[in-house]
């Protein structure tokens, strides 16, 4: 009797696990089915490397959007990754543990703020500042990067702290006993030992930054334009899909699904590069 | 405990079903399309259903393209579109003009420019004029704000102004409301929104010397006007015809007028 219920639970859990995987599979198949035929009909080169996006005139080139997505994400990482890791190190190594246990959940709450709110703050506070002090329209690549950089902070900080805290206390004690200062210990022992976790946190942040839609639509200005400076307005791949999906029909709609395919492939490539780099590091270490 | 609640809620559900099941079956009407006319359609539908409780009218958005598509496919009995000229796909549909909407070119209240010609508007959106100085304003770069491709407001605007090839670095916003917000926040911005949505945060410019008032729009003096169409497959009949007649009646037109759009006639 007991083994029967044991088996039942096993079956149910397996079904649940497979339903999650099959949802992923179905989404992938659906996007590929809707988007890939268009890419080949329109021409891979034309679609990926032309910068003319005029759906009304049947011109679908997404090169500006690809460039914009990469730049905005790069900018966000430039701001969010060092800041996040620094905050994580400070909170785990310099701040007394009881205080850290209060601050960490507070930072994690940042992740619970809806992206519309981040976008709103970007529009009301950040964009006018950039417009008044740096020039340009304000809604720009720079404001998109800054908002995304802030949005990935909770992910980077929280996972980095977890991996830094997982470093055995004896490592630190050994280093300090050899006469190293606190900073030398952090730099040469703690960070080295928790490197894989820190990199993983940055990769997760990267995933969030490249996939974010709402906040970017609100703060990046959305013009289909090759950015010449950080103050230019840009449209990311995600923004392109979300902006035009409600009106799109026929070929235009297929082109948006194809944009989704490009985004999907891009994220897979970025993630694999990151995880390969991660594995190499771990083998070396 | 659980059983008791379960029984109670089941009873309640049965009662509710019986209650709503009573009376005659209602005639369903679905409207879909233009987001500019959607709030008006909802209001009109509410009013109509209060006096005619034999119909239920569902109003959906989706944009003018969706309106034409769903009227064609039968997904909606009435499609809504706000385009100056209807595309080829809509030729087989019966189109009825139920309202008019002016498109206002808006700038920040701080802007000193008050009047633009059609040619100037075209040059601004094409990127030929890039500084307010050239238009008699302050020495500041112009930030052009437009709608996304496929928007009814945008295609109407571009058809009336003619030969618009939107400059590449124009900002794109996805609704009348966000354009208004962008223009209200940026002293150098220019955009276009539905006449009914002008408020004190933005300033509407005169076009060719004509202000975008209700009078000048209805009389045809103000140039940037688009009709709002209801599209029906075949001749409208029965309840659908009654509802459209209601929208065109003085009561329906009054509702349209008092909420910011302009009556058809």
Image (tube, coloured by chain):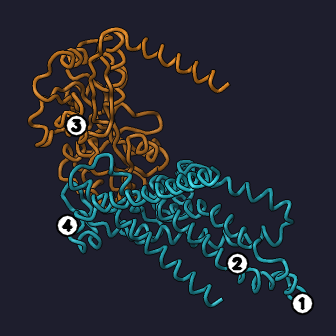
Would you name the residue on which mark 3 appears?
Answer: B70
* Residue B129 appears in view: no
Chain on which label 4 sits? A
Chain on which label 2 sits? A
Which is nearer the N-term, disc 2 or disc 4? Answer: 4
User: Mark 2 or mark 3, which is nearer to you?
Assistant: 2
User: In percent of the image, x 29 and y 45: which residue is there?
Assistant: B151
In the foreground, A63 or B3: B3
Q: Are marks 4 and 3 on the same chain?
A: no
User: In percent of the image, x 42 and y 40: which residue is there?
Assistant: B177
Would you name the residue on which mark 1 appears?
Answer: A179
Would you name the residue on which mark 4 appears?
Answer: A42
User: In percent of the image, x 56 and y 71: which residue is there?
Assistant: A203
Q: Secondary structure at mark 4?
A: helix
In the foreground, A69 or B192: A69
Which is nearer the N-term, disc 1 or disc 4? Answer: 4
Image quadrant where residue B210 sits? top left
* Residue B113 appears in view: yes
Q: Secondary structure at mark 2?
A: loop
Chain letter for the cyan colouring in the rendering: A
């Amino acid at each position: 009797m007991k083994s029967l219920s044991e088996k039942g639970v096993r079956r149910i859990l397996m079904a649940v696990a497979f339903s999650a995987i099959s949802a992923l599979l179905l989404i992938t198949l659906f996007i590929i089915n809707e988007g890939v035929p268009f890419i080949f009909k329109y021409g891979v080169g034309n679609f990926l490397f032309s910068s003319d996006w005029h759906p009304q005139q049947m011109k679908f080139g997404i090169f500006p959007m690809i460039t914009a997505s990469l730049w905005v994400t790069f900018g966000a990482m430039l701001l969010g990754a060092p800041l996040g890791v620094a905050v994580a190190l400070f909170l785990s190594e310099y701040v007394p543990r009881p205080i850290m246990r209060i601050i960490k959940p507070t930072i994690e709450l940042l992740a619970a703020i809806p992206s519309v709110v981040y976008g709103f703050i970007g529009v009301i506070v950040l964009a006018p500042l950039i417009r008044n002090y740096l020039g340009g329209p304000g809604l720009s690549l720079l404001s998109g990067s800054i908002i995304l950089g802030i949005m990935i902070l909770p992910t980077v900080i929280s996972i980095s702290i977890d991996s830094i805290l997982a470093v055995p206390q004896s490592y630190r004690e050994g280093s300090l006993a050899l006469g190293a200062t606190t900073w030398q210990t952090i730099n040469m022992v703690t960070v080295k030992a928790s490197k894989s976790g820190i990199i993983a946190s940055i990769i997760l942040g990267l995933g969030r930054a490249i996939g974010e839609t709402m906040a970017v639509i609100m703060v990046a200005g959305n013009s289909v334009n090759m950015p010449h400076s950080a103050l230019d307005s840009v449209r990311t791949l995600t923004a392109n899909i979300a902006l035009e999906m409600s009106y799109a029909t026929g070929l235009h709609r297929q082109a948006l699904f194809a944009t989704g395919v490009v985004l999907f492939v891009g994220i897979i490539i970025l993630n694999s590069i990151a995880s390969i780099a991660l594995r190499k590091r771990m083998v070396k270490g | 405990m659980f059983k008791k609640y379960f029984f109670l809620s089941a009873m309640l559900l049965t009662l509710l079903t019986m209650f709503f099941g009573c009376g005659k079956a209602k005639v369903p009407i679905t409207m879909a399309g233009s987001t500019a006319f959607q709030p008006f359609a909802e209001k009109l539908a509410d009013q109509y259903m209060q006096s005619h409780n034999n119909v239920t009218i569902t109003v959906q958005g989706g944009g003018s393209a969706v309106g034409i598509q769903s009227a064609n496919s039968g997904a909606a009995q009435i499609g809504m579109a706000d385009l100056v000229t209807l595309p080829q796909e809509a030729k087989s549909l019966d189109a009825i003009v139920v309202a008019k909407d002016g498109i206002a070119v808006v700038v920040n209240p701080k802007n000193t420019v008050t009047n633009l010609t059609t040619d100037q508007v075209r040059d601004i959106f094409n990127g030929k004029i890039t500084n307010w100085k050239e238009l008699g304003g302050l020495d500041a770069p112009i930030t052009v704000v437009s709608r996304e491709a496929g928007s009814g407001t945008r295609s109407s605007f571009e058809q009336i102004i003619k030969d618009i090839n939107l400059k590449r670095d124009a900002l794109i916003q996805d609704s009348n409301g966000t354009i208004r917000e962008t223009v209200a926040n940026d002293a150098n911005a220019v955009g276009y929104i539905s006449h009914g949505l002008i408020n004190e945060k933005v300033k509407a410019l005169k076009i060719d010397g004509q202000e975008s008032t209700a009078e000048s729009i209805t009389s045809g003096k103000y140039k940037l006007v688009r009709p709002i169409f209801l599209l029906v497959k075949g001749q409208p009949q029965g309840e659908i015809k009654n509802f459209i007649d209601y929208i065109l009646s003085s009561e329906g037109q009054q509702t349209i007028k008092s909420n910011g759009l302009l009556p058809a006639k």
